[in-house]
Image (cartoon, rainbow, N blue to C red):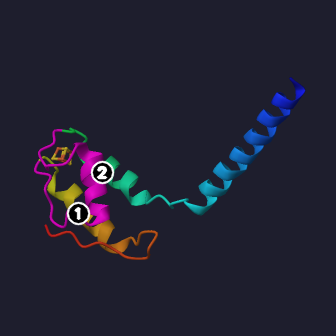
Amino acid sequence: MVQAILMMLVLGAILGAGLGIAAKVFHVEPDTRVDYISTQLPGYNCGGCGYPGCTGFAEAMVSGDADSWKCKPCKADQKAKIIDYLKNTPGPDGKTITIKG
Ligand code: SF4
């Protein structure tokens, strides 16, 4: 019985250490631009842009999947603000994004 408990403790410690190392090695720095852009989009989540909601469109712009503006409900001043933000704010890779209006 004691051996089984010790085996479980050792196994748990080994697996826990493995998960800790994997979390450090495979850590990906999140791109904070997605959150900012999501808050600036209308928030209707209508899907009219062809992406699953406003956050989906924000992720597509930041990832480079969407290189042109596709949100029709967005007001012109908000659109200009988002495009200008992406043009002047580098991501974790140091690159900025140009979206065609
Ligand atoms: S079209 Fe605009 S409001 Fe509709 S989901 Fe896309 S980004 Fe959001």
The C terminus, quarter of image = bottom left
Label 2 environment density (alpha carbons within 10 Å; few <14, some 14–19, many ≥20): some
- Look at the numbered disc 1 and give the secondary structure of its residue: loop
Residues 55 and 14: in front is 14
8 to the left or right of 24 = right
Displayed quadrant of residue 60: bottom left
Q: Which residue is mark 2?
A: 40
Residue 96 versus residue 73: which sits nearer the camera?
96
Give the magenta range: 46-72
Residue 65 numbered mark, or none: 1
Residue drawn at 23 percent across, 43 percent down: 53
The numbered dot on residue 100 is none
Residue 57 position, x and y percent, is 24, 52
Res 70 quadrant in image: bottom left
Q: Residues within 10 Å of mark 1 (few under 14, many from 20)?
A: few
Query: Which residue is farthest right?
Result: 2
Q: Amino acid at mark 2?
A: Gln
Q: Position of residue 38 (x, y in %)?
A: 32, 49
Front-lying residue, 7 or 65 = 7
Q: Is 92 drawn above or below residue 28 in the view shown? A: below
Query: Under 8 Å from ligand 1: the CB of mark 2?
Result: no
Q: Which quadrant does the N terminus fall into?
A: top right
Cβ of disc 1 within 8 Å of ligand 1? no
- Rendered location of residue 64, percent (x, y): 26, 67
